[in-house]
Amino acid sequence: MAENNCVGPVFSDDVTFSNIGDTKSAIACPKCGKLMTKYKMDSKVKNHLDVCHSCDEAWLDGGEWELLKNLNLSFSLPKVFTESWQRKINKESCAEKRRSILKSTIGETDSIKVDKFKVVLDASNFKENILVYLASD
């Protein structure tokens, strides 16, 4: 599973989680010794949850429980391990990487203009017509 190297988020209470430890490679389950699978928690953090599919044990690195609570995931932890959750996180990560590339290419001011236009475009019933027009030059 590819790692997401995004910087940790800053939450509304100004707590930064960028320095929470995370195992970088697969680890052995402390209960049965088999390799654990890594699952992304959120698109904005680099940490992963380690789960053993053999004995259904989870491993949290130091500080990850607090991180889960701040992400509002502590009471809905099983959804993190679903394919749909992992797809959603990958989609968000890809969108943020595209946004970052655009920003570094055209600058912050123009990328904000593009984001505003994208909102208008997405809401339009004539999105395809507008895209054809823009691509015609």
Image (cartoon, rainbow, N blue to C red):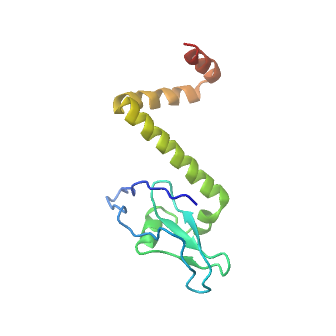
Provide residue 120's location: percent of width, then percent of height. Answer: 52, 26
Left or right: 127 as drawn, with respect to 64: right
Res 125 visible: no
Against 110, residue 51 (above or below) is below
Give the residue at x 62% y 18%. Answer: 132
Residue in the foreground of this view, choosing between 86 and 11: 86
* Among the 4 quarters of the image, the one containing residue 122: top right
Provide residue 97's location: percent of width, then percent of height. Answer: 47, 44
Against 40, residue 35 (above or below) is below
Give the residue at x 62% y 68%. Answer: 78
Left or right: 4 as drawn, with respect to 51: left
Give the residue at x 51% y 30%. Answer: 119
Res 16 visible: yes
Location of the N terminus by quadrant is bottom right
Q: How many marks?
A: 0
Provide residue 51's location: percent of width, then percent of height. Answer: 59, 73
Against 81, residue 125 (above or below) is above
